[in-house]
Image (cartoon, rainbow, N blue to C red):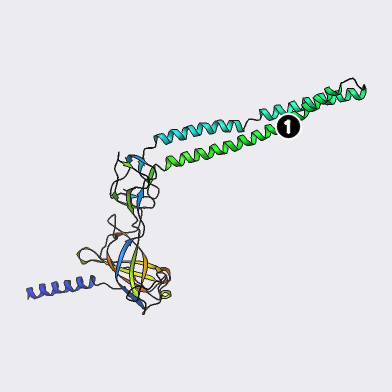
Amino acid sequence: MQQRKERDVITGALILLAAATVAGPVESNGRIAHVHPAHVFYLDEALVPAEQTGPIVSIAVKIGDHVKVGQMLARIDDEQLRRAKTAAELEREVALEKASDNIEIEYSIASHALAESELRHDIQINVNSPGAVALSEIDRKELAEHRMRLQIERSRRDKRIAEKNARIHDATVAAAAHAVQRCLVEAPFTGRVVDILRHQSEWVDAGQGVMHVVRLDKLHVDGLLDASEYDPHELEGRRVQVDVRLAREQIESFIGEVVFVNPQIQAGNKYRIRAEIQNRIVRGRWLLGAGHSADMYIFLDVINARQNERLKEPRTNRHDVEPTRHLSR
């Protein structure tokens, strides 16, 4: 009797385990398209390159580190570029000082006023006493007044040129600062470092990859559908459930939506579709990575997740799922 009870318990447990590992969509009253096999890929991944040529002076991360967009991953030697930037800044200061100098304009205005006053004085003398001042002297002072008037215009032009020169030096400083900034190898998006291709003190050329970074909060899933059964307009924007079989036959479900349907019909009268799914964190680690095979279920009557109230929560065999959040190293 005892053995029979134990056998019944074991049989029941096996039935529950089998039920828990059977792939399939959660309950839905609408039409469903099944894509098998589907394959999981990184939504974003990059071999992050060096933008300057030179030796690597520091590596700021290690394999497996989680990084934020814009975070420094490595730094190329920038000593010479920093010195060039300092020189450019000093030259800009000199140019700005010249551009702000009004002495020449003020002196030219004062000189013109004096020349004009002397000319008028001599003219007035000749009005009162004709011939008292020689005509050649009048002509000389007229020329002096004219020269001083032109000198005002030249001084103003020189100031405009100095101001433009200061702007040129502004651009030079900005270019020098940009060159220094390009010595930093930075994360192009929030993700995880999965490989380090160059190490400290190694020489690297501009364009060579230094780090391999992948995005893990979202992934994309590709698969093929029969063109004779579904039209592209039935699929774009529809909600999907992606079932992935992980270790020990555990099936995890991920929710997303179709983001692209390739209109090009491929061999076998099939076309490729792509969905984006939201990853999630379990025990401080992202649950899903690229490379998995999967089953994708497309809910043809659900345009996006917010419009669907009939679908239950995605299946999970784990009880320690954490909400998606940024991971620190």
Front-lying residue, 191 or 83: 83
What amino acid type is highlighted by mark number 1?
Answer: Leu
| Residue 202 higher or lower than 39, as above or below | above
Q: Residues within 10 Å of mark 1 (few under 14, many from 20)?
A: some
Residue 313, x across and y down, in percent: 33, 68
Front-lying residue, 44 or 308: 44
Q: Quick check: can you spot residue 313?
A: no
**Residue 229 picture quarter:** bottom left
> Which residue is rendered at x = 54% and y = 34% of the image?
92
Q: Residue furthest front?
A: 136
> Which residue is rendered at x = 46% and y = 42% of the image?
178
**Residue 166 picture quarter:** top right
> Which residue is rendered at x = 52% and y = 32% of the image?
91
Residue 196, x across and y down, in percent: 29, 48
In the rendered view, does 77 fall on the left or right side of 287?
A: right
Quarter of the rendering occupied by the N terminus: bottom left
| Residue 162 higher or lower than 23, as above or below | above
> Which residue is rendered at x = 43% and y = 42% of the image?
181
Front-lying residue, 8 or 95: 95
| SS type, badge 1 | helix
| Residue 222 higher or lower than 71, as above or below | below
Q: Residue furthest top?
A: 132
Q: Residue furthest right?
A: 129
Q: Quick check: can you spot residue 125?
A: yes
**Residue 82 picture quarter:** top left
The residue singled out by tag 1 in the image is: 150
In the rendered view, does 88 fall on the left or right side of 67?
A: right
Residue 81, x across and y down, in percent: 42, 36
Q: For the image shown, how many numbered marks are present on the structure?
A: 1
Residue 266, x across and y down, in percent: 35, 72
